[in-house]
Image: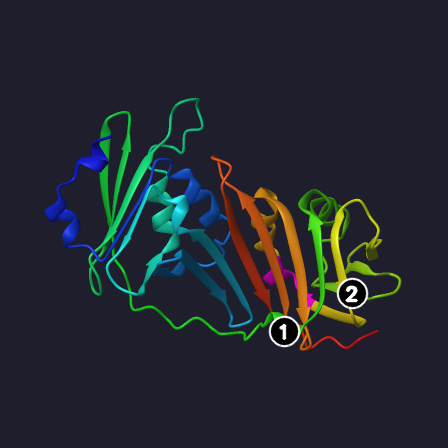
Amino acid sequence: MPLSTQSQSQDEQYVLVANLDNARNLSNILKAITCKDHAVFTATANGLKVTVEDCKCMQANAFIQADIFQEFTLKEDMVIFQVNLTVLLDCLNIFGGSTAAGASTALRMCYMGYGHPLTLFLEEGGVVTVCKINTQEPEEPIDFEFSSSNVTNKVILQSESLKEAFSELDMTSEVLQITMSPSQPYFRLSTFGNSGNAHYDYSKDSDMMELFQCSTTQTNRYKMSLLKPSTKALAISCKVSVRTDSRGLLSLQYLVRNDDGQICFVEYFCCPDEEVEEE
């Protein structure tokens, strides 16, 4: 593959080099968090974390582990930069994002450090395209201080069942209300839209429920406009973990299998809507 034949001297100038035989393994998971133009990339020895935020109330993170890349070389403990996510996705799909058998776009992603562009070498069928994307001063992502020790309620569902729920609930509702309880209704999703109130209930013994750990009854509302982008992650996931902490902060963690069967994670944090009073 031409991309692997770059000279050692070329590689030495980069603080980050990441190779993928199939660029779709990156582009698909980045699409799942695309709700704003800009994203902060944080590279560590563990891999890549890509963060997008909206109104300081919602944060989406994509985690791509280092072992998913065919090569992942990092010269510093941590490398952080911000890029336009829309532009990056356009570049990753420059060959049309073909899914034809045997056709895949290879990616070599390189970064020289602060102030330098992110350079993408994309190769398909012997044709190499080089894209350079300007990087920006990264904004410090919010630390929502979501700790597993503060989690009050947690359920793990098969994604198909949550997709079904969203198809039946009224998405004209301004909020999604989530009730989690050790007793009935156990796990309930509610909307209040143009066609009236709708509820979707899960029994703790449901076949779709892989884990049910609820210690207290909690009812919180979340702005639908902040949650809608997470349905992109839901669409490509096979499982979803729904957690709330004592403050009502919501964590939606999606398990995603890429084209090669490897596992990545997408996580959304969403603050509760405090403007709406309980009925």
Q: Which residues are magenta?
A: 222-227
Q: Nearer the viewer, residue 3 or 52?
A: 3
Earlier in the chain: of badge 1 and badge 2, it is: 1
Q: Is residue 34 above or below residue 81?
A: above
The residue to which callout 1 is attached is 149
In percent of width and height, residue 107 lies at: 31, 40
Quadrant of res 81:
bottom left
Residue 69: give its label.
Answer: none
Q: In the image, is 140 to the left or to the right of 278?
A: left
Q: In the image, is 182 to the left or to the right of 43?
A: right
Q: Amino acid at mark 2?
A: Met
Q: Residue at x 77, y 77 (%)?
A: 277
Q: In the image, is 147 to the left or to the right of 38?
A: right
Q: Secondary structure at mark 2?
A: strand
In percent of width and height, residue 212 lies at: 76, 58
Q: Nearer the viewer, residue 3 or 98?
A: 3
The residue to which callout 2 is attached is 180
